Image (cartoon, rainbow, N blue to C red):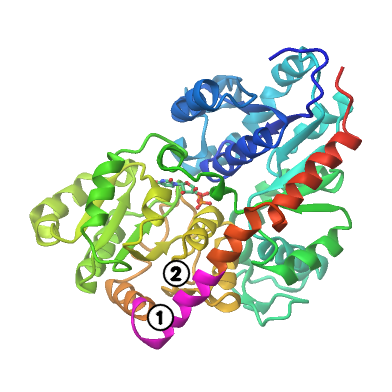
């Protein structure tokens, strides 16, 4: 790989250590490499191990010029349990701040690695939540582009709320208000819009992220122009800097192998899932999965199960290993699994989500509204039942339900963080699930929703093709970094 006269631009990608941030950046790494760039993808040993199959594929089969750089997080120094290198491994809420701060300890090793590269890096793409990368890029004299995980709708809403100083006027975090300066009536409250970010202990880190974003050379966003055009244009105007929409990144994964390996090793054989889905009617199955972080408490899981059973539809239900308490196992084994065995597939652990969503048997997705999951559903033409929990998810719900018209809300109003123990143990009742499933799948309204999401699916595919907006924006991003980046030697 080392070639002093290598004319290719060299991108350094620094994701946040959370699945919802690493997965799209890994897609971006491969897209950049296929489009003629060299990439250094910064990761940690635990996270690299999860994607070992993809790394092997990149190195041995596709031979893309990507270097996976494994920098260990010194857990003791970071105040984290040994091996805790990802947000989904946090044992409790007490460690959230330490997890956000920990990657900063990679600064020295990252600088050493980058200084040793010949030719050196041309440009850095760093997650918005990695503000410490600002000093690294400035020391190396290379442009730094921020990667934003959420939708432009969310980013613009957050921007407008801050611009109008809503925090100063509203002291009750549950008081509803309309997001200013939007063409739609979007009612939200501060707890839903920002959750943990409003806590006093988050302020210092928030300010660091905002400062790093304000000094960045540009912004890349995992969205596409035809999905939320008004919001993208308005966000560009608001920011006054380069904004490249380069999604949906999930569509990089065209073949079955790439889809199946995404993010982690699946805890079920993909062929078993395919065979099961093949045996179901097209558009009949509800897929239930809440991303990588959201955790349901035992009583809530049981309520979801009862709702799925009462809906009388086939379902694929993903339950995380950490959620599988003896209470839930007991309830499952005492009749639930047997009663639903002909129409229910339960995945305990990591699901091959893209394989599932892309199957024609899937007719709806009960989701926590993580932006990747939302985009994956759109890219697969699957309408959604929305059950937001924290971060950008409540505003994503507004986009999916009120603006795009492709979702049905399950009805949650109160945010919960993924590790919170003090929330109501049952936020959503079985009847809410039955009603939402029936609204999603039945009648004229259901048909219209399906048609809308299929139109967006086509637009998403088109954006990725040569001449499409994402394709062109990728070219523009690479060109910008070539022109403005370090010459590298
Ligand atoms: N995912 C998956 N299998 C799982 C859980 C999650 O493949 O069992 C993937 C999902 O396809 C998505 C990502 O993990 O790409 C989760 O990101 P999202 O933004 O939806 O939610 P987050 O995990 O950040 O809350």
Q: Position of residue 190 (x, y in %)?
A: 64, 67
Q: Nearer the viewer, residue 344 or 322?
A: 344
Q: Is residue 316 above or below residue 184?
A: above
x 43%, y 49%: residue: 354
Q: Is residue 449 magenta?
A: yes
Label 1: how many residues lie within 10 Å, few (<14), some (14-19) or many (20+)? some
Tell me which segment is drawn in magenta: 441-455
Q: Is residue 475 left or right of residue 269?
A: right
Tag 2, which secondary structure?
Answer: loop
Q: CA distance from mark 1 to mark 2?
A: 9 Å
Q: Is residue 81 left or right of residue 243?
A: left
Q: Is residue 210 above or below residue 154?
A: above
Q: Is residue 221 magenta?
A: no
Q: Are marks 1 and 2 in contact (CB under 8 Å)?
A: yes
Q: Is mark 1 within 8 Å of ligand 1?
A: no
x 14%, y 61%: residue: 340
Q: Which residue is mark 1?
A: 446
Q: Quadrant of the C terminus?
A: top right
Q: Quadrant of the N terminus?
A: top right
Viewer can see residue 100: no
Viewer can see residue 259: yes
Q: Nearer the viewer, residue 432 or 285?
A: 285
Earlier residue among tags 1 and 2: 2
Label 2: how many residues lie within 10 Å, few (<14), some (14-19) or many (20+)? many
Task: Please tell me whether the stretch drawn in magenta is mainly helix, strand or loop.
Answer: helix
Q: Which residue is mark 2?
A: 383
């Amino acid at each position: 790989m080392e070639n002093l006269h290598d004319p290719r631009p060299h991108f350094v990608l620094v994701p946040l250590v959370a699945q919802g941030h690493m997965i799209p950046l890994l897609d971006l790494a491969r897209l950049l490499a296929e489009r003629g760039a060299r990439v250094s993808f910064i990761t940690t040993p635990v996270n690299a191990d999860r994607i070992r199959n993809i790394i092997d594929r990149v190195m041995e089969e596709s031979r893309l010029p990507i270097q996976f750089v494994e920098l260990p997080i010194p857990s003791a120094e970071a105040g984290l349990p040994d091996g805790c290198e990802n947000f989904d491994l946090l044992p409790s809420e007490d460690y959230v701040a330490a997890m956000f701060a920990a990657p900063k300890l990679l600064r020295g090793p990252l600088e050493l690695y980058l200084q040793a590269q010949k030719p050196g890096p041309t440009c850095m793409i760093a997650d918005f939540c990695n503000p410490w990368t600002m000093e690294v890029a400035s020391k190396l004299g290379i442009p730094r582009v921020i990667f934003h995980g959420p939708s432009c709708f969310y980013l613009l809403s957050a921007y407008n709320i801050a611009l109008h100083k809503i925090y100063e006027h509203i002291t009750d975090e549950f008081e509803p208000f309309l997001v200013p300066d939007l063409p739609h009536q979007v009612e939200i409250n501060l707890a839903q819009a920002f959750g943990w970010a409003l806590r006093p202990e988050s302020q210092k880190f928030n300010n660091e992220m905002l400062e790093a974003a304000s000094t960045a050379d540009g912004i890349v966003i995992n969205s596409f122009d035809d999905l939320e055009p008004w919001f993208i244009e308005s966000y560009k105007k608001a920011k006054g800097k380069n904004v490249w929409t380069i999604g949906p990144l999930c569509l990089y994964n065209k073949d079955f192998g790439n889809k199946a390996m995404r993010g982690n090793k699946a805890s079920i054989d993909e062929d078993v899932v395919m065979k099961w889905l093949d045996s179901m009617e097209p558009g009949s199955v509800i897929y239930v999965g809440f991303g990588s972080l959201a955790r349901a408490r035992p009583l809530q899981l049981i309520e979801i199960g009862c709702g799925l059973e009462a809906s009388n539809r086939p379902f694929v239900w993903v339950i995380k290993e950490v959620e599988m308490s003896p209470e839930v196992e007991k309830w499952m084994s005492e009749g639930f699994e047997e009663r639903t065995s002909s129409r229910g597939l339960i995945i305990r652990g990591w699901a091959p989500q893209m394989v599932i969503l892309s199957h024609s048997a899937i007719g709806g997705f009960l989701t926590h509204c993580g932006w990747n999951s939302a985009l994956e559903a759109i890219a697969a033409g699957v309408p959604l039942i929305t059950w937001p929990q924290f971060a950008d998810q409540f505003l994503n719900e507004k986009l999916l339900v009120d603006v795009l018209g492709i979702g049905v809300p399950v009805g949650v109003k109160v945010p919960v963080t993924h590790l919170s123990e003090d929330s109501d143990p049952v936020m959503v009742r079985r009847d809410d699930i039955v009603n939402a499933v029936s609204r999603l799948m039945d009648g004229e309204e259901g048909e219209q929703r399906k048609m809308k999401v299929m139109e967006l699916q086509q637009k998403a595919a088109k954006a990725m093709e040569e001449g499409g907006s994402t394709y062109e924006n990728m070219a523009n991003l690479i060109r910008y970094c070539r022109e403005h980046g370090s010459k590298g030697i």
